[in-house]
Image (cartoon, rainbow, N blue to C red):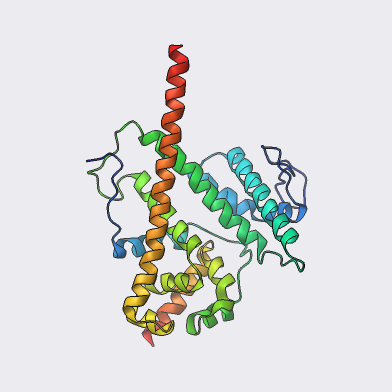
Amino acid sequence: MPKNKRRDINEDEFFGFAKSYLSEAFPNPQRIGCPPESDLISMATCPNERHAPVSEHLTGCSPCFNRYINILADLKRK
Amino acid sequence: MAANGSPHSFRLNAVDRHGRNIDPTVLAAAEEVFPRALDHGLKLLGDAAVIANALEEVAAVVSRVVARTVAARTDPVPIKNLPGYIFRAFVRHVNRLKRKQLVLVTSDGNEQASAPRWADPSREFEMKILVDECLAQCDFVTQDMFWRRVQGFSWADIGRIHGLTAHAAEVRFRHALQRAHVRLTNGRRQLETDDSARLDRRAEAHNA
């Protein structure tokens, strides 16, 4: 087996890992650059290009990521 | 290297270690994110001085991007959320540094190919890079698919939100993930090639 051969990416593992990683990796206790809750709700219910900066922010802020995931969970339940 | 005595608890130099100038606005934004960068960087690199150097390098590169943007536009549009932009660029830079360390560690051929997926820290780190690269390369719609899929939305639900079929939504996301995977693989090969060439040069110098 070649020493650097990669395994295929399993989607469930990938998203499971991503959720756990993004929920902890970027603590932002001072909440630098965080959008208001209303922007997160608006992006969850009616996503469009104007939310791009909010979505970008989620890639590097665990508190906002966790909040957004909770909002999506509520939305999914409805 | 960071110095003391600024409005922030840490102050970065206005010139990075390669002698590149850092724009004052970018410098202020970099100093603003320094505590977060330090927190994140310490977990991966473990040395505050290395982290400060890395952040200065990122700030220097971002300064050039800002300067080019201003020069190219008659009506300059500043980067929205500059601290956030710098922080994400820093995360990717640290990932590259860490990946290079891991290539050096594993290039002796002792990689545990049969080990469970997450038993090896280097594999776990590669997944982190894959997530970061995937998100960095995604456009807004694909990022939105990512968030919803993380929360367990079906592709049919995701497609409906974005006016696509379930299949089209899944294919769109898979392509983005594939691109990130290819980029990661190519980056690793390049690092290994560079490392191999460096070792060859060292061996030649030793033999000479």
Give the residue drawn at x 77%, y 48%. Answer: B6
Quadrant in which residue A10 is drawn: bottom left
In the rendered image, the vertical position of residue B151 relative to residue B206, given as above or below: below
Q: Is residue B154 visible?
A: no
Residue drawn where x is 64% and y is 55% of the image: B33
Horizontal side of B114 relative to A67 (left or right) equals left
Q: Percent from the top left, x then y, of residue B144?
A: 46, 73
Q: Quadrant of residue A54?
A: bottom right
Residue B176 in view in this figure: yes
Q: Position of residue B82 (x, y in %)?
A: 66, 61
Q: Please tell me which residue lies in front, B206 or A34.
A: B206
What residue occupies the far bottom of the structure in this picture? A78
Q: From what the image shows, is residue B171 above or below residue B67?
A: below
The quarter of the picture where the N terminus of chain A appears is top left
Quadrant housing the C terminus of chain A: bottom left
Q: Position of residue B21 (x, y in %)?
A: 74, 44
The correct choice, above or below, for B78 with respect to B169 in the image is above
- What residue do we see at 59% from left, 70% from top? A53
* Count of numbered circles on the image: 0
In the rendered view, would you say B132 is above or below B166? above
**Residue B181: quarter of image:** bottom left
